[in-house]
Image (cartoon, rainbow, N blue to C red):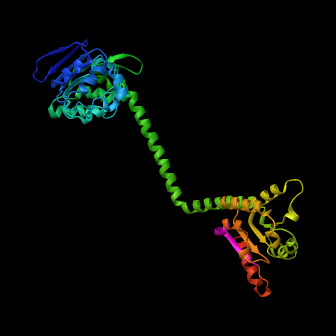
Amino acid sequence: MYLIVPKNNSLIYVDVSYSNTNLAILILQIRLETFISNGGDYSFAWNQLKRSPYNTLKKIVWKKADLDIAIRLYGNQFFKDTRSIEYMDISENDIWYFPDDLLNPMPNLTYLYFSKNSFQSIPVQLSEHNKVKMLDVRKNRLTSVSSAIRDWADKMQELHGMTLKITDNAFECNCDTIDFIRWIQTTKVNLDSRSYKCQLSNGTIIDTLIAYNSLYDLFADCKNTMWLTFASTLLSTTITISMLLLAYHKRWKIIFSIYGVIRRVVEHKVWRIYKYDVYISYEGDIVIWIKNVLIPKLEEEWGLTMCIKDRDFLPGPSQADNEAESIQNSRSIIFLITPEFLSSHDYMFELDRAKYERITKNLERIIIITKDITITDIPVEFSYIWNYAFIIQWPKSLEDLDGTWRKLRMLLTDGLITNI
């Protein structure tokens, strides 16, 4: 059974046996001011209220309609079309929480009845409403009233008077609720009682008036806990400040120590990774020139370590495995491009491996030396590394040889040898 009171205040009783269509038409023909529903599913009544063309509803009483399910399903959208509401009674709906801003669409709320629900705390969003004169939250599961709601209730009392009904809740009397116990006896808000049942930490049931009159006896340990917390906080703060002052006083020593550790770690990592200073990629008889020209200069004079496959590759592993491991363990790679190099495609694996090691920042330099060919004859596959490769044209004239050696030495020994 729904009781609908239109604006002319004449009562209309509508039986739920009416068809949905007829009831909807009837509601659309009146300007609703009061709506009362007791029992039944919420969805039918809610859908009809949404169809009302006038925003004139001021009073809504909606009990035993499982509104907790509706609020969970629709959240802030459930009351979006009820801006004119002043009086709301949604008791006996097993509601245990309100989504944020659920009541924001109703700025004119004055009388609120939330009794016989399952609230564990009064929704703090009520503190944003400044017209509330009555709040009924009896027979819920409140253990206390938060400081935000207490301050709000005191403010409402100063503005226009405030009645707060909180009987039959699961109040607690302990160190955390001392301020609430005091507030009950000192506030000017019109409470439904000044003595409520509450449970001590040991399980004993007393009332808040007795707790108020025996604060120092019942909650003497709270002061000890408070001072212990204060002392612990003060001690930890003092230690932290002392350590910060010490760190500031020794800041340069600490910075240099950290720098030294990082440098040693980095240097150890660099020398551990690089087994060779340079890997030589070549083809054919140019190995004789490497033996007679490059080895004496790079190894004997400059002190570098070279990887030459005809000399350093061990028998057993495949050629590709030897090449991959050696390039990975080399600081730089030299591609010695000669006419024989051009006629072979065995260099492709070395080139791909060099590109990979360079992208992963493991290979520091890629050097291309052209001998007995021009730069324009370099294979097109090398165009993919132009941006980070160094090219040296090996001179035919002995007069230009010193400059070439100087350039090669700068590329290979940068950061390794200081007496260049």
Residue 391 spot, x, y in % from top left: 70, 74
Tell me, yes or no, if residue 314 can be seen here: yes
Residue range corresponding to the magenta coloring:
385-393
Is 237 positioned to the left or the right of 250 in the image?
A: left
Residue 90 spot, x, y in % from top left: 27, 21
Residue at 76%, 69% (x, y): give it: 334
- From this view, report whether residue 29 is shown above or below residue 355: above
Residue 360 spot, x, y in % from top left: 66, 58
Residue at 41%, 17% (x, y): give it: 203
Whether the magenta-drawn stretch holds residue 389 is answered as yes
Closer to the camera in the image, 17 or 293: 17
Residue 405's image quarter? bottom right
Report the quarter where the C terminus lies.
bottom right
Tell me, yes or no, if residue 119 can be seen here: no
- From this view, report whether residue 103 is shown above or below residue 272: above
Is 387 positioned to the left or the right of 241 in the image?
A: right
Whether the magenta-drawn stretch holds residue 296 is answered as no
